[in-house]
């Protein structure tokens, strides 16, 4: 700032204000550019990780695979995420935060039981097709931390099953459907949606399906499962 000392005090003050404003602007601009680049790199890593986890699973994925897919070096990947477990957790939470609101919306919808079964199966399978790593991760988390997982999932709300049961029991009383155990109905519907994803590698090997055929198969099940369930409870 010595160059300002040779100017009169009034001019010094004006020059200093202009210089300070310019410095502030440059600082804000540089912070914005750095943050934008950081966000862009992180999004690139997350997109690459989703792809690798979907194709290789949690156990088969390596940090090097994710770095290669993202087009960055492994050191930069570790700067953002210290391990594949941390990276997977971020992706899982992101997917899960979208998943349960949809399931709750399906259960809470003010629609008839038949339509609710169709809605539930459609939303569940759609979400699994978009995030095929979810089922195994949920099972893993439930086995390791059942209480905390349930607490985080339902957030002090009653379980979706209880709300679904109320509607089933009401339909039984009206004699619209035959007498069924709500637990049996819910588990049948849930397991028919989720099992193909849990057993996907085994099923693809046994059936000879490739990825495209499996997706088509599950698209068909979005209508086949509710049809089977609804037919099973008709009087």
Image: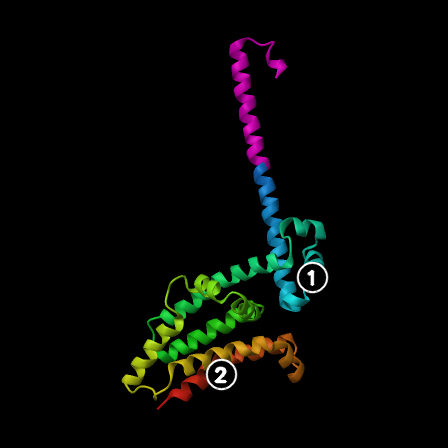
The earlier-in-sequence mark between 2 and 1 is 1
Asked whether 90 falls inside the magenta stretch, the response is: no
Which residue: 71% across, 53% down? 74
Kindly identify which numbered label has been placed on residue 215: none
Residue under label 1: 62
How many numbered callouts? 2
Residue under label 2: 224
Q: Which residues are magenta?
A: 1-30
Residue nearer the viewer, 159 or 122: 159
Residue nearer the viewer, 19 or 146: 146
Residue 69 in the figure: left or right of residue 159: right
Asked whether 12 falls inside the magenta stretch, the response is: yes
Instruction: State which quadrant residue 46 falls in.
Output: bottom right
Residue 99 in the figure: left or right of residue 208: left
Residue 137: horizontal and vertical position, in percent? 56, 67
Magenta span dominant secondary structure: helix
């Amino acid at each position: 700032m010595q160059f300002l000392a040779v100017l009169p005090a009034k001019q010094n003050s004006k020059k200093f204000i202009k210089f300070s404003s310019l410095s502030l602007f440059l600082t804000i601009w540089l912070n914005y550019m750095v943050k934008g680049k950081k966000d862009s790199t992180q999004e690139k890593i997350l997109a690459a990780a989703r792809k690798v986890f979907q194709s290789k699973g949690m156990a088969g994925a390596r940090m090097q695979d994710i770095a290669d897919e993202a087009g960055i070096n492994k050191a930069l990947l570790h700067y953002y995420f210290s391990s594949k477990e941390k990276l997977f957790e971020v992706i899982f939470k992101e997917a899960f935060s979208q998943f349960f609101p949809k399931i709750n919306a399906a259960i809470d919808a003010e629609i008839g039981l038949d339509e609710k079964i169709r809605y539930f199966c459609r939303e569940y399978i759609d979400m699994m097709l978009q995030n095929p790593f979810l089922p195994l991760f949920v099972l893993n988390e439930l086995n390791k931390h059942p209480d905390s997982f349930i607490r985080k999932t339902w957030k002090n709300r009653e379980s979706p099953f209880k709300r679904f049961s109320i509607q089933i029991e009401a339909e039984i009383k009206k004699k619209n459907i035959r007498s069924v155990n709500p637990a049996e109905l819910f588990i049948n519907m849930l397991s028919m949606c989720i099992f193909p994803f849990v057993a996907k590698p085994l099923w693809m090997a046994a059936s000879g399906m490739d990825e495209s055929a499996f997706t088509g198969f599950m698209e068909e099940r979005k209508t086949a499962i509710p049809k089977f369930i609804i037919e099973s409870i008709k009087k």
